[in-house]
Amino acid sequence: MPRIALLIEYNGKAYHGSQTQKGVITVQQDLESALATLAKKRLPVILAGRTDSGVHARGQVAHFDWPIELELDFERFESSLNGITGKGMSIVKAQVVPDKFSARREALSREYVYRILNRKHASALMCDTHFLVRQPLDVEAMTGAASELLGRHDFSAFRSTSSSAREKSSPVCRVSRSQILNKGEGELEFWIRADHFVYNMVRIIVGTLVEIGLHKRSIESIACALEKLDRNLSGPTAPPWGLTLHRVTYPDEYNLFKDEN
């Protein structure tokens, strides 16, 4: 059966997260329902990474196997799939990949961006994509604290305590990018890239950085939390709607979505 990889964008407001859940619409369910319409049978979809309810994606990756006995007009496939999936999702690109490819297991890194709007009044245009912080933020302090995350660390202090029993992945992550960008007019972006992430890691980091920016915590509190491995030493979990999964990278041998991603 041909294996096909998909590059996907979605508005997190339209979905109750990425993974299948009973009684609600998720990214995985929307995709599998659309594929079932085309193939006349269920085709399991594997996503590169999990996103929670409200979290957006610009560069989510998925793969599935198309039944070899079914004819596939690949030239029209992307348009056909976009015509069936919900309005909150867009299939940016489809690509045939080797059978060994796995959207989840072969990912080398994932990159997220978290957007903050730092001004007194809310924005009608950015309310679904930015976390509004009304008090002035010390961006210089946040930038210095963010740099402490670079390198290989145990992120137990930045993992949701509710996930510890069910999350079996190692809390040790290698962070290759941790950067605050000041876009002007109160718009801030926190960019982070790592080989993998633990549950709610980015949102807890952002919550901590915001408290540093508000001078509720010291710059050193990041390093202290990393050293002590104590969730009580990090900040609150920032809201989901500011977070976007921006990119997932794979080995060069797949030449995956080079033009789009």
Image (spheres, grey):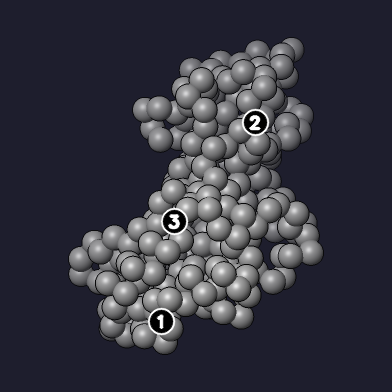
Image coordinates for residue 66, horizontal then vertical, percent: 68, 22
Q: Residue furthest front?
A: 227
Q: Can the viewer see residue 13 in this picture?
A: no
Which numbered disc, 3 or 1, marks the residue that appears first in the sequence? 3
Which numbered disc, 1 or 2, marks the residue that appears first in the sequence? 2
- Check disc 3 and report the residue beneath it: 150
- Check disc 1 and report the residue beneath it: 218
Residue at left 47%, top 77%?
Answer: 221
Of 191 and 33, which appears nearest the observer?
A: 191
- Specify the amino acid type for callout 2: Ser
Residue at left 46%, top 43%?
Answer: 247
Marks 1 and 2, Cα distance to the nearest angstrom? 41 Å
Label pair 3/1, CB-CB below 8 angstroms: no
- Specify the amino acid type for callout 3: Leu
Q: Can the viewer see residue 67 in this picture?
A: yes
Of 122 and 119, which appears nearest the observer?
A: 119
Of 89 and 157, which appears nearest the observer?
A: 157
Side of 229 where 110 appears, left or right: left
The image quadrant where one finds the N terminus is top right
- Specify the amino acid type for callout 1: Ser
